[in-house]
Amino acid sequence: MSRTQKKLPQNNIEMRKAIEKDLQEFLASGNKIKVIPMGVSGQDKMGRSKNIVISRKRQATL
């Protein structure tokens, strides 16, 4: 079942159980968890764009 089809947890306990189940499925499928050191960011150090589209709103032409 895909993540969007799953019923959302009703409270924190159910949410924790769902996360734990998802984690166990992830690890059982052979995936590994990467440990990212403190201070590491996904941002480009040179300030260049990552081509992330935040809005599809068109700019008004003058």
Image (cartoon, rainbow, N blue to C red):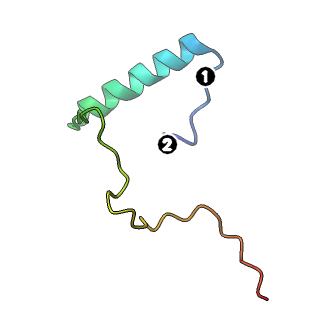
Q: In the rendered structure, which amino acid carries the disc numbered 1?
A: Pro
Callout 2: 10 Å neighbours few (<14), some, many (20+)?
A: few
At x 32%, y 57%, the residue is 45
Numbered circle sitting on residue 2: 2
Q: Is residue 52 left or right of residue 12?
A: left
Q: Is residue 20 left or right of residue 58?
A: left
Residue 60 location (% of width, % of height)? 77, 81
Residue 27 location (% of width, % of height)? 26, 30
Depth check, mark 2 against mark 1: the one in front is 1
Instruction: Say what secondary structure mark 1 lies in.
Output: loop
For residue 61, what is the image quadrant? bottom right
Residue 24 location (% of width, % of height)? 32, 24
When the figure is inspected, residue 25 is found, relative to residue 20, above or below; the finding is below
The quadrant the C terminus occupies is bottom right
Residue 16 location (% of width, % of height)? 49, 16
Instruction: Say what secondary structure mark 2 lies in.
Output: loop
Residue identified by numbered label 1? 9
Measure how far apart labels 2 and 1 are at the Cα level.
15 Å
- Whether residues under marks 2 and 1 lie with C-beta atoms below 8 angstroms apart, the answer is no
When the figure is inspected, residue 54 is found, relative to residue 11, above or below; the finding is below
For residue 50, what is the image quadrant? bottom left
Q: Is residue 5 left or right of residue 39?
A: right
Q: In the rendered structure, which amino acid carries the disc numbered 2?
A: Ser
At x 40%, y 28%, the residue is 22
At x 58%, y 40%, the residue is 5
